[in-house]
Image: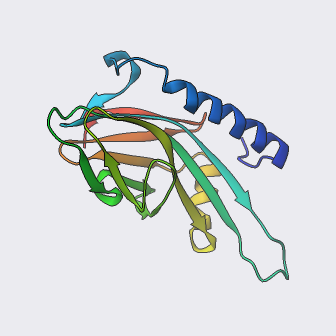
Amino acid sequence: MAMKIDRRAFLKTSAAMAVAVSMTGLLGGCSDGDGSTDLGGFTVAVGKWSAVPHDQGIGTGKSWYADFAVTVRVHNLDDSNGFSFPAKSVFVLKIDGQKVALQGGDLLSNITLVMKKGERKTGILTFRLDESQKNLYQAMEAQTADIKLRVGVDPTETYTGVYEGYIKKDSKLA
């Protein structure tokens, strides 16, 4: 199954994702059945992910890259305070064991997750694979790459990429 999609399909998928993300705000509290879990102060649920490769063509002076987006829902359960953590301490992405830097997304502000008491946020985390990481993208395209997103401070959980476009929670804590 190729991960390449044309612009029209990407726009349709993006629009559908935007609707899905906006509707998650209508949901009630996180239940045990939705894959979210209590990570000592907040709950998190990781959902769909998408990839868009870009090849500027030979002679353009621009190299190949692929942009990715992962949907994440977070709820701060802390009774007394909000929290503010550097994103790298909350979300860690590894593909075939290689750490991939998160670029941001609407869930993160200045690469820091900031949430007030009781606040809920649903948003996107983004990352990019560049020319030097094309082997990781090719492994993902061949559906052989091991994609792991670790979430939390203490304890942490690990979510695994599924090639149907979802990230599922592993049964064990990492």
The foreground one among 174 and 92 is 92
Note whether 167 is above or below 102 in the view shown: above
At horizontal 62% and vertical 66% (from top left) the residue drawn is 134
Describe the colour scheme in one phrase.
rainbow
Decide which of 151, 80 is in the foreground and name it.
80
Residue 13: x, y in percent?
72, 37
Residue shown at the point (24%, 47%) measured from the top left: 83
Quadrant, the C terminus: top left
Percent position of residue 116, x then y? 28, 41
- Asked if residue 49 is positioned above or below residue 36 in the image, the reply reads below
In the rendered structure, the answer to whether residue 166 lies left or right of residue 85 reads right
> Taking 156 as reference, is 128 above or below it?
below
Nearest the eye: 13 or 111: 111
Asked where in the image residue 60 lies, by quadrant, the reply is bottom right
Q: Residue furthest left?
A: 80
Residue displayed at 80% across by 40% down: 9
x, y percent for residue 77: 23, 31
Q: Is residue 72 visible?
A: no
